[in-house]
Each structure stands twice: as C-alpha cells, then as structure tokens.
Image (tube, grey):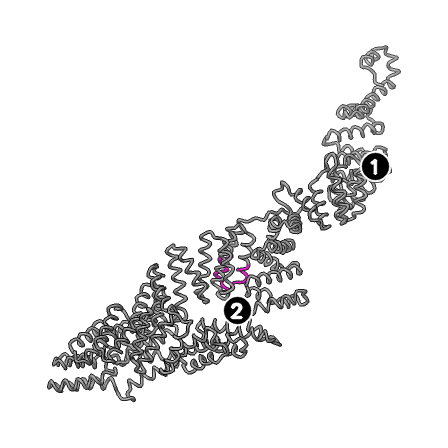
C-alpha cells in the first residue's frame, strides 16, 4: 500500500526515539511502495513510468538478489519503449538469474518484441531460447506461432510448417492463423489434401473468411477437382463481404470450365477476368483464344491467339497452330499458311510440329505453291516414319511434284520410284515435256532435245507427243540441223489426231522453213501453202505474212514469177513488217519478167518509204543493174554512185565500182572507168569481183594505150590472192583453225602476229574480228571491246554485223547505254536476217529505257511486238519493257494492262518481272487485296525465278504491314530468310524484320511466380 507523501513527512517529524526504533521497517515499506507502483504501471502498459518506479526500487534496495523481479520488469519495460540497451538488460537478467522463473519469460519477451518490430532473425534466436516447459499455455501458443511466422518470413518453410502444424491443434488465439499458414505451406508442398483441411478450418474465422476462398479454390484446381472448383468458386464469388482476389477466382473457375470442355462458360469467366486489363498472362490469353475458337467466335480467337503466337515456346507453337485453324475457319488460307509455318518451324512439341507441317503443305497445295509443298515435306517420311498422315502426305507430295514448275525434282522423284504406274508414266511424259520447254526457253537446246526424247519414250498423251516432236524440230532448226528438223516436224504429221492440235499447223510452218533452208523449194512450197490454207491461221498472226513471203520466194526460185508476185502483193496487203524486202523482191521479179519500169518503181518505193531499210543498198544496186542491163548507163552510174557514196559499208560496193567502171567505159569516160577498176583492186583485192575488175582494167588500159600500168595492179592482185601454200594464207588459216577449235588462248597471239606482219592484207578486217571475239570468249572484255570497235569503225569485215552486235552488248553491259544505242541502231541497218534485226531492236529498246527515253522505248517495243517472236527472248522482253516504260511515265493503268499481258504471255524471266511489277502497282494504288492475291499467284508459274520470287514475298510482307498484320508479316519475312538462296533478298528481309521487331510488342505479361 502506498503512503501519501504528507503522511510520510508527518511521521518523519515525530519523536526521535520512536522513529529510530521503527526506522528499519518503515524503510522497507517505503521501498516496496516503488515496486508495487511499478507493477501497477506495467500492467497498465505505462512502461516509461513503470521503468522509473522499478529503477528507484532497485536503487533503494541495492541488493541484486532482492531486486531480481524489479530488474526483469525494468528490462522488459525498456523493450516496450524500444530503448537501445533493453536487449542487453534482458540478456543480463537471463544470464545473472538463469534459474529465476522470469528467465524463460525474458527470452519470450525478447523474441516477441523483435517479432513485433519485424526483426525475424532475432525473433527466431530468442524464441528458440524460451524453454517451452517454463512458458504458460498462452505464451507457448504465441511463441510457436510467432516463431513459425518468423521462419516463414525467412523462407525456412520446413521449420515454419512444423510449428504451424503443432500450433494449429486445439482452440486458442492462434488456431485459425496457424491453420491458414499450415494450409498455405501444405499447398506449397503439393499436399493438397492437407492444405484443404487446414484452409477449411481457417475459413471459419472471420479474419480469414474472405482470404481463404482464393487459396482454397486454387487448391481444388491443383487437385484437378474441376467440378468442386466451379461449385466452390462460384459460391465464393457471391459472398458478402466480397472475397479477396475475386478476379483470380474467376480465372480459376473459367479454367475449370475450360478443362471440362464447357467453352461457353469458360469464355464468360475469362472475359470477365480480362475486363479492364491492359495485358494478360500469355497462358490465359491462349486459353481464351482456344475457348473463342471452340465457340466459333473466330475474330476474338484470332486476336487472342495472335498475341501468344509471337512467342517461340510451347505455348506460342500451340497458339500458332490453332491460329492457323482459326484462319482456315475464316477461309483465309494465306494467313493460315503463315501461322502453320510458324508452328512447324519450332522444335518443341513434335506432335504439333507434325500436324502443322501437314496443314502447311495442304494449304500450299491448294494454293498451287507446289515447290513449297515439296520443300516442306522433303524430309517428312524420315522425320515421322510412323506418322498417321503418311498416306495423305504421299498423295500431296506426289501431286505437287507432278504439278510443280520445278520439273527437275519431279523427274528425279519419278525416276527413283521402284515401280511406276501407268498414271505416273503419263505424268512423266508431261513433266519431261514441260522441262524441255523450259530448257528451250532458256536456250539450252541440246538439253531440251534430250529431255524431249525422254518424253517421247512414253507417248500416252498424243497432244504432248505432237508437242514434243514439234519442239524438237524447233530446237534442231535453231541449230540449223535441217534434216533432223525435217524428221521431227514430219513426226508430228504421223501422230494420231495431231491435226487437231496447234502443233500440226506450226509444224507446217517449221518444216517449210527447214526445206527452204535446205534449198528444197518445191517441198517448202507445199508446206507453206498448206500452212496458209489452214483456217486457224489469220492475218493477225505474225507468221502469216512471213509464210506468204517465203511461199513467194519459193515460187520465185522455181521461176513461177506470176505466183511469186501474187503472194508478194498479198504479203503487202497483210501489212507485213518486212514490206521493204517484199518491194525489193518485186523489183527483182519485175526485172526478170521484162517489166523494167515497174521494177524500178518498186525499188524507188522501197527507198522512199524505208530509207533506212537493210535492203536499201540492195535496192539502189538493183535499180542500177536494171538500168545497166538496159544500157541506160547514165542513170545506172547515178545509182551505183549513190550506193558507193551513201552506203560505204555495204558489201555491194566492190560490185557497184566494177559495174560503174564498165558503164563509164561504155560512155567513153575511160579515165573514170579505169579509176573504178583500180579502186576495186586497191581496196578489195580479195573480193570475188576483183578478178573481173582486173580483166576490165586490162582492156581499158589497152584501149587507152596505158598497158604499162597493168603490171602494178597485177602485182597487187597476185599479192592479195597468192597460191594456197603462200605464207600469209597459211598463217591466217592456222590462226582461224585455232579459233574455230575454241583454242582462244593460242589463237590470240596468232591473230595479233598476223595483223602486225601483214597490216595491208585484205584478211586483216576478218583477223581483227576473230581476235576481238577470241578476247571476248576468253573473258578479256576490255581488249575484246577495243578490237571489235576497230572492226565496227573500219566496216570492211564480212563479220561486221556480228562485231557491231558484240560491241553494242558490251557497251550495254558496261552501263554506257547511249553508246550502246548507237551501235544497236547501226546493227539495225546492217542486219542481214530477222534474228539479227530482232537483237538490234531488243538492245535498242533496253538502251532507250536505261537512258530514260521511255517514249522511244515504247516505239521500239511496239515494232518488236509487230514482228512476232523472231527470237525467243525479243517478243517477251518487248511486252515487259513496254509496260516498264509506261510505268516510268506514271501511266499506271496502261502499265497495269501491259504487265498483265506480259505476265500471261511470257513464261520466262520477263513474265516473272512483269508479274512482280503488276503486284507492285497494285500496292502503290493501295489495292492491298489485289496486291496480295496477285503476289501469291507468282509461284504457280514463276517459282523458279528466285530474284523475283524473293521480291514478291518482300512485297507481300509490306502489304501485311500495311494491313496491320504484324504476325503474318514476320512469318513471311522469316520464311524468306530461311528459304531464299539469294543473300541480297535475305539482307532486305532481315532489315524489314528488325524494323518490325522494334515496332511490334506482343500484348502479354510475365507469368506470376
């Protein structure tokens, strides 16, 4: 009992003896007052005042044994006050009084104090030191819980679980909390039964009633007890107050419905869960996509699966596969193909890879991408020897080989078959023929003939058989092997029902030409006539007028001049592009039939209408001949002079000089005549007319009494025309032999030595041509260009037109397009046959294009098209460049039409480029669907042209980007990188892919731990 201060003071003032006698007992009572006051304050949690009271008590008593309890309370009060020395005081107490009843409580108090301040390391250290047998029941339960939670916080889950499991028993303050954490740790260890029992206990407490449902739902999910997940989860979501993590419970319930294949309910919960979220876990989004797919909500499925398909993991592979299925449901085969392509390239889930590979091949087959079918299934039987798709794959692969433009692989595939059915042999006949056509178009004629022989070994389809024989005839004709060509064309006529095919009529034309070139004009005449009499041949056919001209030529050679004139006139009426030749021939025929004036008129019409005609020099010469033969020497001299002065490079100049000389002599102009004869021997000593000139010179000099001059020219003639064993001739012939035997390294020094040794030789112009061509064939184009340019400038070689063509081609190759155009233009005038003329026009057209002269490009292209396919490449190139010129001039609609015509008509590289450029025009016009559809058609016809195939798929990727289809764009670019053999295309694809990666981020989040 506390004494009031006033009473204590009054007592102290009483008498001395009494006070002295009672001093000891009064002092004790006063000291006890501080201890009791401290206890009261400690119980009321007035720890500051309590610590002062206990401190005063300890000071007054000054006896450690008597003040042990006070020391304990003093130290514990310091703990509650967070005094820095409190921990040390408690430890001192426990050390000083180890047997004191409060020693156990001291460690307990230390541990709980540090627990409350979240210092779990020290909480563990001191609570472990508190002996359980010296704590009361409440302290023991509190100690176990707080020690367990401290271990839990330090992730020592094993120790924590032992304590929570021990503490969850019975009914006390920490029963529910211990059960909750014990349940969580059981769940964590995969003990779902134990977790469920503990959490069900914890759920009974109001503090855990809203916390437990999420974890318990997750436990049920882990047990794969999906009906219970649904039942318990849906009941929990209806609770009041609301449970914690309701959206996570929705996700679990949705997933449970998903696992039970109730995709409609699953989708409802998934969408509720996803509502308002900016990003989703990719597993969730994948399942949402699958549920949407199963519910036929393909648009939603597409969006969800597309976001996951970006990932190169198992989930991404599965998402890509199902995204492909989704696109198929929408009949979007192109997008489906890219999705399956993505899935088949990931080596994660072998079953998904297998199925995706088959789907990818199927779609490519349906879209006509046969080469891609072959590539994708090339190793399928090896990779999946026991595949359930084996039969289906074999059918697809076989058909793809047979329909592919990659006929070489198709042929190899069939030739490796141990057994070949009738149907396979029919296909073999067809693909070998198609490969022969390709080889022919690539100007590999001997290889084409070999392939055609393979096709003809299986003559099942009569139209293909006729086509094979016809193409053999064409190949032999190009090689000027006329007898073989005649046999092949003739075989067409012997093929059953060949008369119903286009090849029958074409063979008439071809065999006519073969007989014509063999100079069997009577037989050629029969076939040309039959060709023209066929009802399928119309005036618009480029060969129609040509056949008329050749028929007229045959009548001319067989001296049926009336019929010849008739067909020449018909050719003119048909507006033949060779009207200049026809007019020339008419002039010749009129002259032969005595109609001199009409002959001259025809030749004058030629010269007036076609001043740059390759027959202009012939016309001038023939006009002179007509006058000469009719003794009209003055006009004859005028014509010959025109030829000599204006057509100095013509091969007829020596003849014109000789004839003019004779005309001068007949007009008594001996000196002028003698000068012409001398000029022939001076300038053209080896020409066949030089012999005539020598005789004429002899007569003229004799008549002029100048015979002494003859020796000089006789010597010149003999020098230029030595005996066959003469050294000059031997050297020249030896060099030529090396050239024609393709020994160019040896031929070059021989020709150089010849030119140096015999600079005045009449053979030098030809030697210089052979030298230049040897350099060219040896790969030394710089020296080739120098030598051949000299030939072109000199203009005396009989190989002049070949030299000019070679110079033009080299200048074009060097990028000197203006110079190239000059030489192509000259070749156009020099050309001696249709092939040379077509080559000249082709080079001129391209040169105009590359000098940005697009209008002239179109003019030359039109001329080439009007002439028909004089060479394999010219007609198709003309179609292409006419479109390119229109494109460059900004006439997109016109270019569109022309590229369409070129891509349809030409099956070579010209058609491939035209097809690509048409897709590009669609893209520039923002006709994205047309660009995409047309781009995908490319590989059906032009799959072998890697450059344009690569460019086309780069364009397809650009279209996808424009359509905001990043997944499709990436898949396309990855496919290009993996499949194209061209590094330049790979580089462009990588650049586009990198740019795309920097702008596209998949809408997923990292999964929770």
Specify the segment rendered in magenta: 975-989
Q: Is residue 852 above or below residue 528?
A: above
Q: Name the spot of residue 719 as percent of width and height, x first.
A: 23, 85
Residue furthest left as drawn? 705
Helix, strand or loop at disc 2? loop
Judging by the rendered image, the residue that carries numbered circle 1 is 140
Indicate whether residue 878 is drawn in magenta. no
- Front one among 782 and 273: 273
x, y percent for residue 533: 39, 75
Q: Image check: 517 left or right of 14? A: left
Query: Which residue is at 75% across, 39% downward?
Result: 236
Residue 118 placement: quadrant: top right
Say few, some or many: other residues with alpha carbon within 10 Å of mark 2 (under 14 / 14 to 19 / 20 or more). Answer: many
Q: Residues within 10 Å of mark 1 (few under 14, many from 20)?
A: some
Q: Nearer the viewer, residue 424 or 770?
A: 424
Left or right of 311 in this view: 493? left
Whether residue 742 can be seen here: no
Q: Tell whether 680 sits left or right of 555.
A: left
Please name which of the two marks, 2 or 1, marks the residue nearer to the observer.
2
* Residue, disc 2: 406
On screen, 248 above or below 699? above
Viewer-proximal residue among 200 and 938: 938
Q: Position of residue 531 (x, y in %)?
A: 40, 76
Horizontal side of 490 relative to 121 (left or right) equals: left
Q: Is residue 520 visible?
A: yes
């Amino acid at each position: 009992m506390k004494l009031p201060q006033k009473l204590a003071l009054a007592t102290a003032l009483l008498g001395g003896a009494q006070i002295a006698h009672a001093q000891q007992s009064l002092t004790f009572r006063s000291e006890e007052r501080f201890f009791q006051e401290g206890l009261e304050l400690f119980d009321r949690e007035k720890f500051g005042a309590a610590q002062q009271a206990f401190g005063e008590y300890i000071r007054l008593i000054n006896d450690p044994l008597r003040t042990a309890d006070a020391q304990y309370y003093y130290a514990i009060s310091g703990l509650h006050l967070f005094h820095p020395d409190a921990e040390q005081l408690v430890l001192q107490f426990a050390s000083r009084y180890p047997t004191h009843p409060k020693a156990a409580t001291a460690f307990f108090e230390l541990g709980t104090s540090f627990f409350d301040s979240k210092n779990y390391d020290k909480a563990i250290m001191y609570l472990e030191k508190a002996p359980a047998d010296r704590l009361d029941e409440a302290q023991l339960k509190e100690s176990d819980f707080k020690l367990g939670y401290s271990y839990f916080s330090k992730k020592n889950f094993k120790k924590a679980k032992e304590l929570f499991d021990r503490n969850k028993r019975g009914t006390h303050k920490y029963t529910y909390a211990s059960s909750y954490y014990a349940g969580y740790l059981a769940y964590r260890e995969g003990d779902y039964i134990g977790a469920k029992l503990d959490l069900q206990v914890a759920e009974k407490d109001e503090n855990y009633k809203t916390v437990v449902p999420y974890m318990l739902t997750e436990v049920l999910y882990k047990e794969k007890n999906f009906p219970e997940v649904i039942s318990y989860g849906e009941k929990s979501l209806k609770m009041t107050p609301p449970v914690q993590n309701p959206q996570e419970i929705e996700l679990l319930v949705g997933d449970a419905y998903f696992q039970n294949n109730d995709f409609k309910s699953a989708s409802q919960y998934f969408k509720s869960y996803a509502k308002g979220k900016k990003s989703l876990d990719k597993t969730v989004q994948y399942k949402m996509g699958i549920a949407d797919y199963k519910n036929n909500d393909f648009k939603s499925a597409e969006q969800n699966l597309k976001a996951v398909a970006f990932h190169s993991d198992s989930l991404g592979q599965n998402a890509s596969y199902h995204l492909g299925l989704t696109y198929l449901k929408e009949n979007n085969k192109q997008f489906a193909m890219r999705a399956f392509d993505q899935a088949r390239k990931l080596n994660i889930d072998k079953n998904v890879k297998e199925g995706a590979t088959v789907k990818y091949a199927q779609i490519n087959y349906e879209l006509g991408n046969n080469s891609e079918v072959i590539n994708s299934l090339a190793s399928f039987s090896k990779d999946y020897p026991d595949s359930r798709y084996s039969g289906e794959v074999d059918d697809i692969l076989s058909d793809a080989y047979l329909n592919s433009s990659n006929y070489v692989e198709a042929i190899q595939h069939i030739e490796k078959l141990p057994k070949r059915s009738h149907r396979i042999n029919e296909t073999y006949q067809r693909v070998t023929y198609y490969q022969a056509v390709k080889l022919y178009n690539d100007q590999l004629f001997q290889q084409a003939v070999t392939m055609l022989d393979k096709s003809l070994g299986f003559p099942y389809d009569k139209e293909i058989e006729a086509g094979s024989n016809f193409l053999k005839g064409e190949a032999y004709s190009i090689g000027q092997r006329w007898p073989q060509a005649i046999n092949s064309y003739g075989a067409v006529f012997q093929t059953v029902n060949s008369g119903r095919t286009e090849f029958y009529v074409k063979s008439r034309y071809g065999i006519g030409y073969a007989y014509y070139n063999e100079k069997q004009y009577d037989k050629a005449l029969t076939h040309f006539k039959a060709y023209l009499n066929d009802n399928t041949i119309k005036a618009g056919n480029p060969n129609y007028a040509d056949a008329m001209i050749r028929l007229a030529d045959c009548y001319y050679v067989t001296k049926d001049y009336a019929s010849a004139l008739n067909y020449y006139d018909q050719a003119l009426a048909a507006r033949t592009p060779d009207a200049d030749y026809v007019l020339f021939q008419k002039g010749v025929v009129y002259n032969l039939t005595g109609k001199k004036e009409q002959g001259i008129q025809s030749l004058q019409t030629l010269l007036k209408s076609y001043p740059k005609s390759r027959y202009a020099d012939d016309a001038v010469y023939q006009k002179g001949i007509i006058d000469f033969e009719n003794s009209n020497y003055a006009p004859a001299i005028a014509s010959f002079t025109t030829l000599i002065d204006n057509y100095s490079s013509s091969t007829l100049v020596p003849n014109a000089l000789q004839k003019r000389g004779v005309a001068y002599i007949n007009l008594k102009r001996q000196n002028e005549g003698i000068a012409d004869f001398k000029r022939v021997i001076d300038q053209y000593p080896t020409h066949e007319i030089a012999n005539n000139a020598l005789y004429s010179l002899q007569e003229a000099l004799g008549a002029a009494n100048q015979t002494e001059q003859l020796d000089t020219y006789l010597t010149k003639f003999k020098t230029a025309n030595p005996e066959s064993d003469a050294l000059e001739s031997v050297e020249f012939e030896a060099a030529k032999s090396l050239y024609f035997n393709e020994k160019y390294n040896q031929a070059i020094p021989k020709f150089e030595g010849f030119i140096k040794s015999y600079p005045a030789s009449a053979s030098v112009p030809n030697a210089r041509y052979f030298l230049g061509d040897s350099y060219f064939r040896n790969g030394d184009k710089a020296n080739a260009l120098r030598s051949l340019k000299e030939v072109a400038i000199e203009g005396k070689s009989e190989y002049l037109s070949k030299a000019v063509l070679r110079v033009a081609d080299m200048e074009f190759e060097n990028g000197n397009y203006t110079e190239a155009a000059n030489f192509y233009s000259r070749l156009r005038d020099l050309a001696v046959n249709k092939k040379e003329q077509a080559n000249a026009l082709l080079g001129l057209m391209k040169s105009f294009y590359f000098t940005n002269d697009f209008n002239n490009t179109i003019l030359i292209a039109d001329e080439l098209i009007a002439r028909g396919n004089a060479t394999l490449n010219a007609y198709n190139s003309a179609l292409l460049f006419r479109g390119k010129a229109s494109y460059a001039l900004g006439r997109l609609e016109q270019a569109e039409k022309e590229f369409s015509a070129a891509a349809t008509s030409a099956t070579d590289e010209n058609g491939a480029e035209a097809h690509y450029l048409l897709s590009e025009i669609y893209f520039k016009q923002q006709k994205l669907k047309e660009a995409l559809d047309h781009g995908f058609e490319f590989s059906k016809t032009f799959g072998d042209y890697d450059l344009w195939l690569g460019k086309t798929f780069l364009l397809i990727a650009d279209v996808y980007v424009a359509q905001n289809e990043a997944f499709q764009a990436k898949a396309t670019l990855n496919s290009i990188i993996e499949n194209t053999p061209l590094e330049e295309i790979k580089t462009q694809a990588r650049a586009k892919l990198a740019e795309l990666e920097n702008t596209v981020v998949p809408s997923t989040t990292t999964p929770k731990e």
